[in-house]
Image (spheres, grey):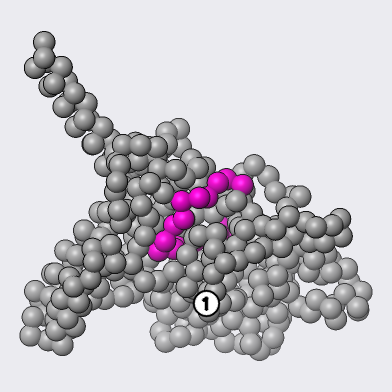
């Protein structure tokens, strides 16, 4: 399905203006003038496998970005962000949920929160938050992989209530980086904060079983294949700009009234054909559909300083067996443990001598 958006084979056919090529490929969902606007790939899982290497993650990213393996460069991972919650995030969510309960003690919302809190307490601790990454897995991840980790932060205005501090949503999406320099008050549309090439709400986490691993080519004429060990389901929301009445653009814009805004007019096709990433003339006339994503679309990296590998916050870990080995040394929690162990060793040395 994603190949209909941007695939090397379809691009080649689209560049060939013959009738046969147009019949085979049909209209591309994102027209050629807007291909350069296909921007960052974002992965937001609730489980992160510990066996990712630079090469294996690049293979998956290349498939989502529809890139030919022969055209991949050393900076491919810079085109992906992995959104992951921190320990501080869950602590803040619990505080806010309790505050909501305090304000609504005698309402239906309070009873819902109370039931969920009691149900969570009965579960084993590791199953309460539905987010899984152990310290051993994080410690062994390739440095190039953890460099793509970004903070999960709630979107504003809030898109979901604080009735639960857990995370269940898993998503993968690709942004459209359009520079809107025109607006029309008559269309009733606001300037969208973010625009999506596609957005996939899925059951798949970031593991090789769910995302697949490359199967080596068996012959010179055969294409690379991916093998999977998990069965996953998802819903894919694809923006379509094909000069049809069904054209729509998926956006993140909480100010939209209802589900859609914008309307077709007789100049829509001409506007679409003449649009570029820097001058998307079609925005006023195409229908827009707001997706209520509950987190910030463009997340802040855990590594705020490009010259250092240290993390600004500690990623949430459902299990900590050793907080001082491998990549754990880069987190505030790991550094704190290292200082405490150092001070203990200093005290023992002083006591002996």
What's the residue at 16%, 63% (across, down)?
Answer: 95
**Residue 48 coordinates in the image, percent (x, y):** 44, 57
- 274 or 323, nearer to the observer: 323
Q: Tell me if I can see residue 277 in this picture.
A: no
**Residue 63 coordinates in the image, percent (x, y):** 65, 61
Q: Secondary structure at mark 1?
A: strand
Vertical placement of residue 91 versus 164, above or below: above
Q: Quadrant of the N terminus?
A: bottom right
**Residue 244 coordinates in the image, percent (x, y):** 69, 86
Q: Is residue 341 left or right of residue 321?
A: left
Quadrant of res 274: bottom right
Magenta stretch, residue numbers: 36-55
**Residue 282 coordinates in the image, percent (x, y):** 63, 75
Quadrant of res 122: bottom left
Q: Is residue 92 left or right of residue 216?
A: left
- The residue to which callout 1 is attached is 234
What's the residue at 61%, 47% (across, down)?
Answer: 55
Vertical placement of residue 213 versus 148, above or below: below
């Amino acid at each position: 399905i994603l190949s209909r958006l941007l695939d090397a084979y379809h691009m080649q056919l689209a560049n060939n203006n013959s009738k046969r090529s147009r019949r085979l490929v049909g209209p591309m969902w994102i027209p050629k003038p807007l291909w350069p606007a296909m921007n960052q790939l974002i992965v937001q899982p609730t489980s992160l496998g510990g066996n990712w290497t630079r090469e294996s993650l690049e293979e998956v990213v290349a498939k989502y970005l529809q890139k030919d393996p022969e055209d991949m460069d050393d900076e491919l991972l810079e085109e992906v962000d992995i959104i992951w919650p921190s320990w501080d995030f869950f602590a803040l969510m619990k505080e806010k949920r309790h505050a909501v309960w305090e304000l609504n003690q005698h309402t239906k919302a309070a009873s819902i929160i109370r039931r969920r809190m009691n149900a969570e307490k009965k579960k084993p601790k590791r199953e309460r938050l539905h987010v899984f990454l152990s310290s051993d897995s994080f410690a062994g991840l390739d440095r190039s992989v953890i460099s793509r980790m970004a903070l999960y932060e709630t979107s504003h205005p809030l898109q979901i209530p604080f009735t639960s501090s857990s995370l269940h949503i898993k998503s993968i999406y690709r942004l459209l980086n359009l520079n809107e320099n025109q607006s029309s008050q008559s269309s009733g549309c606001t300037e969208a904060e973010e625009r999506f090439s596609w957005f996939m709400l899925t059951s798949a986490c970031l593991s090789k079983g769910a995302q697949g691993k490359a199967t080596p080519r068996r012959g010179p004429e055969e294409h690379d294949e991916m093998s999977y060990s998990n069965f996953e389901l998802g819903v894919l929301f694809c923006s379509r700009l094909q000069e049809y009445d069904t054209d729509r653009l998926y956006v993140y814009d909480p100010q939209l009234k209802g589900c859609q805004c914008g309307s077709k007019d007789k100049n829509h096709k001409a506007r679409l054909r003449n649009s570029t990433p820097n001058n998307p003339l079609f925005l006023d006339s195409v229908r827009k559909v707001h997706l209520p994503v509950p987190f910030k679309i463009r997340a802040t990296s855990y590594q705020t300083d490009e010259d250092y590998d240290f993390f600004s916050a500690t990623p949430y870990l459902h299990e900590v067996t050793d907080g001082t080995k491998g990549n754990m040394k880069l987190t505030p929690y790991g550094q704190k443990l290292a200082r405490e162990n150092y001070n203990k060793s200093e005290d023992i040395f002083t006591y002996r001598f």
